[in-house]
Image: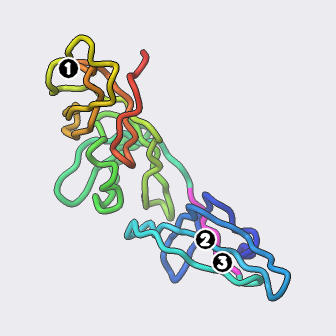
């Protein structure tokens, strides 16, 4: 059990019998009244982010989670399947928990899964992914001076807006949370 004044960003807690990930936490100690901690926390079962205020002295159960690198195999309409590279055991994770990232996931790539009670409950996705551009209109010489963009289709099927100079076959960095172009990938 953790005291609410010890709640920090990136903690995993059990709240109302559901696992949560603390995305933001601020401790307040006003001159009058008791101290409190304001948090934003993400429900790992529903992916919903909610704000909450914990009063000073309350206790929350801190979750004992593990992180395991697993290989992404495939995705169907409801679940995504991952394989433990050490034991070859397969695990499924509901697509609703990773829907933000699903369009940027490549089969055969490794991802870090969050494990609780021997079962994956979420994914710790990288801040940037490198993907190849498979479709876009051709690059035109001299188009680097403006901020104009065009649509590009990536190898996973995701579409992003890229600068006019990006061409088919180039590898680019993408922020999967916002679906935005971050720059050319250097290899």
Q: Is residue 17 above or below residue 104?
A: below
Q: Is residue 186 left or right of residue 11?
A: left
Q: Residue 157 lies in magenta, yes or no?
A: no
Image position, residue 157 (x, y; %): 19, 38
Say the numbered circle drawn on residue 60.
3
Residue 35 falls in which quadrant of the image? Answer: bottom right
Q: For mark 1, what is the residue?
A: 168
Callout 2: helix, strand or loop?
strand
Image point (37%, 70%), residue name: 46
Image position, residue 145 (x, y; %): 34, 20
Q: Is residue 104 left or right of residue 128?
A: left
Compute the Cα span from label 1 to label 3: 51 Å
Residue 24 falls in which quadrant of the image? Answer: bottom right
Q: Earlier in the sequence, mark 1 or mark 3?
A: 3
Image point (32%, 25%), residue name: 146
Image position, residue 104 (x, y; %): 30, 41
Callout 1: helix, strand or loop?
loop
Q: Is residue 163 above or below residue 104?
A: above
Q: The magenta stretch spans which residues?
A: 59-65
Q: For mark 2, what is the residue?
A: 39
Image point (40%, 27%), residue name: 183
Please rate how many residues cluster around mark 2, counting C-alpha atoms within 10 Å: few if below 14, some from 14 to 19, many from 20: many
Task: Name the residue furthest front.
Answer: 146
Image position, residue 12 (x, y; %): 58, 64
Compute the Cα span from label 1 to label 2: 43 Å
Task: Name the residue furthest right.
Answer: 31
Residue closer to the observer: 38 or 57: 38
């Amino acid at each position: 059990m953790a005291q609410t004044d010890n709640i920090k960003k990136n903690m995993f807690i059990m709240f109302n019998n559901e696992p949560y990930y603390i995305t933001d936490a601020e401790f307040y100690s006003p001159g009058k009244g008791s101290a409190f901690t304001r948090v934003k926390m993400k429900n790992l079962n529903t992916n919903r982010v909610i704000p909450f205020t914990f009063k000073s002295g309350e206790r929350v159960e801190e979750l004992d989670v593990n992180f395991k690198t697993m290989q992404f195999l495939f995705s169907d309409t409801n679940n995504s399947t991952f394989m433990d590279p050490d034991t070859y055991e397969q695990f499924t994770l509901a697509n609703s928990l990773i829907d933000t990232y699903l369009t940027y996931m490549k089969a055969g790539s490794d991802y870090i899964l969050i494990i609780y009670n021997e079962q994956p409950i979420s994914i710790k996705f990288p801040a940037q992914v490198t993907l190849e551009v498979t479709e876009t209109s051709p690059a035109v010489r001299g188009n680097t001076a403006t901020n104009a963009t065009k649509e590009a289709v990536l190898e996973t099927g995701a579409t992003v807006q890229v600068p006019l100079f990006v061409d088919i076959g180039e590898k680019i960095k993408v922020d999967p949370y916002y679906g935005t172009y971050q720059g050319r990938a250097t290899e």
